[in-house]
Image: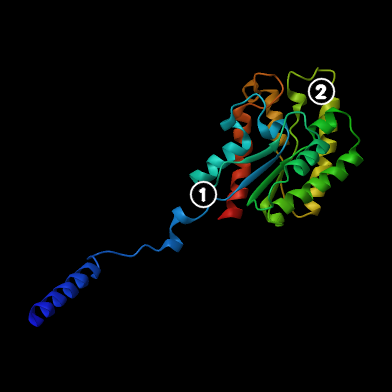
Amino acid sequence: MRFLLSLTLVSFLLACTKKNEPVTGYVPRDTASDTLATPAKTYLALGDSYTIGQSVGETERFPAQTTAMLRQQGIKLSDPVYIAQTGWTTASLQSAIVSQNPSPTFDVVTLLIGVNDQYQRMDTAGYATRFTQLLENAIELAKGNKANVFVLSIPDYSVTPFVAASEKPRVSKEVDWFNAINKRITTAHEVSYTDIMPLSREAATDASLIANDGLHPSGSEYHKWAEVLAPKIQARLQ
């Protein structure tokens, strides 16, 4: 009886040893380096109709196209979160940020705002104050890191059919004024600035760069913006 118990115990121990033996060629997975375990970077897009992509599909918006380009470069980036709406001024965007109260945890924040301030003939001094506040909001939302923020200039919509020929010089000049302000403030805060004004003016001789509404950029125009913006964000995220 004592012999049988000993034999059973030995058999049990041998079986356990075999179960715990490593499989030949097996390499334990390093979860720390597993890309699937790496959380995606987050992107907040602040702005107006140019950010939300009025009159184009969701995937044609410049933040969406920028995201797609970055993913092609191997950057794990989640879909953009938008705080943007057609017709918004700087004051509108400020109110929306307060009401939505987004978490200040974004890896990337883009800001493009001001065309409706110009269109509504709002004073440039007020725009400068509100834009400064919005830029500081953007930095705060980007984990307090100004290197995570990317500002875009206002496009020149005077080249579109929406603006009468007699009004084109005035509109173009005023957009220049507003861009001079947002560029000065952005530069003073040492934040990345992308001037898409020259690209937007190409629509004067290329109707394919204008959406069907005769005012807003087409997906092709937004693609050009994304091509300029994506490398800047890539350099920051890699």
Q: Is residue 237 left or right of residue 45?
A: left
Disc 2 versus disc 1: distance between alpha carbons? 42 Å
What is the number of callouts on the image?
A: 2
Residue 36 visible in the displayed image:
yes
Q: Is residue 187 left or right of residue 62?
A: right
The residue carrying pointer 1 sits among few (fewer than 14), some (14 to 19) or many (20 or more) residues within 10 Å by Cα, namely: some
Q: Is residue 60 above or below residue 79?
A: above
Earlier residue among tags 2 and 1: 1
Secondary structure of the residue carrying tag 1 is: loop
Residue 76's tag is 1
Q: Is residue 167 left or right of residue 23?
A: right
> Tags 2 and 1 in contact by the CB under 8 Å rule?
no
Residue under the image location 61 percent in, 49 percent down? 233
Q: Is residue 86 above or below residue 142?
A: above
Please name the amino acid that badge 2 sits on.
Lys
- The residue sitting at the front extreme is 1
User: Quadrant location of residue 124?
Assistant: top right
Residue 44 at x, y percent in the picture: 66, 44
Q: Nearer the viewer, residue 33 or 9?
A: 9
Q: Nearer the viewer, residue 122 or 16?
A: 16
Residue under the image location 79 percent in, 32 percent down? 115
Residue 194 visible in the displayed image:
no
Residue 27 at x, y percent in the picture: 31, 65
Please name the amino acid that badge 1 sits on.
Lys
Secondary structure of the residue carrying tag 2 is: helix
Q: Is residue 126 left or right of residue 46?
A: right
Which residue lies under the disc numbered 2? 168
Residue 126's tag is none
Residue under the image location 37 percent in, 62 percent down? 29
User: Quadrant location of residue 81?
Assistant: top right
Residue 126 at x, y percent in the picture: 90, 40
Please identify the quadrant where the C terminus is shown.
bottom right
